[in-house]
Image: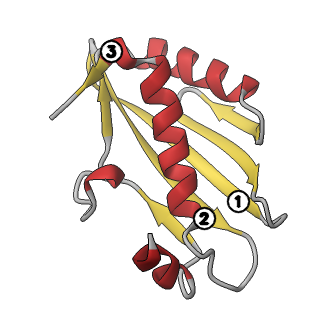
Amino acid sequence: MLKRALIGLIRSQEQTGEKASLPELKTRYYKLSRDSLWDEVVQIFKKKPGYKVLHEVKNVGEIVMEKRTVTGRVQDVTLTIFSINPLKSAIDVYSASRGSLGDLGSNYRTILDIYGTIDKKLAQYKITN
């Protein structure tokens, strides 16, 4: 955590992906069609306190949200949901803090919170590597 905070002094964004160096920031996969995963994720974050869904662009697979941190800063969060095959989909997350200073690792923690929330709700569909 200290390393994330130190990196966060200068960085104000974090993202997940296939080639992420940290295992917790790797793309997540689920045994659900893209449409089913989309519906589940939209419902989760419309109800989750602290998150505000701003835009849903289903044909592109993007959900754009805002999250307020405990310090009052605003983070812009984009979830990208994409289809691997008809019965398997994946989610990547991009989170960036507004403002010029670093985030002290808050974007990293936001991504862990998002993945944790989705994994808990969709545990039966999660594909572990």
- Of labels 1 and 2, earlier in sequence is 1
Q: For the N terminus, which image quadrant?
A: bottom left
Q: Residues within 10 Å of mark 3 (few under 14, many from 20)?
A: some
Residue lying farthest to the front in this orientation: 2
Q: Residue at x 46, y 82 (%)?
A: 7
Provide the residue designation for mark 2.
106
Which residue: 32% across, 15% down? 125
**Is there CB contact under 8 Å for labels 1 and 2?**
yes
In the picture, the disc for residue 75 is 1
SS category of the residue bearing label 1: strand
Distance CA(mark 3)–CA(mark 2): 28 Å
From the viewer's perspective, tell me whether residue 13 is left or right of residue 88: right
Q: Evaluate if marks 3 and 2 touch, with contact meaning CB atoms under 8 Å apart.
A: no
Q: Position of residue 101 (x, y in %)?
A: 69, 85
Q: Is residue 53 left or right of residue 124?
A: right
Residue at the image position 33 percent from the left and 51 percent from the top: 24
Q: Earlier in the sequence, mark 1 or mark 3?
A: 1
The amino acid on which the numbered mark 1 sits, given as a three-letter code, is: Gln
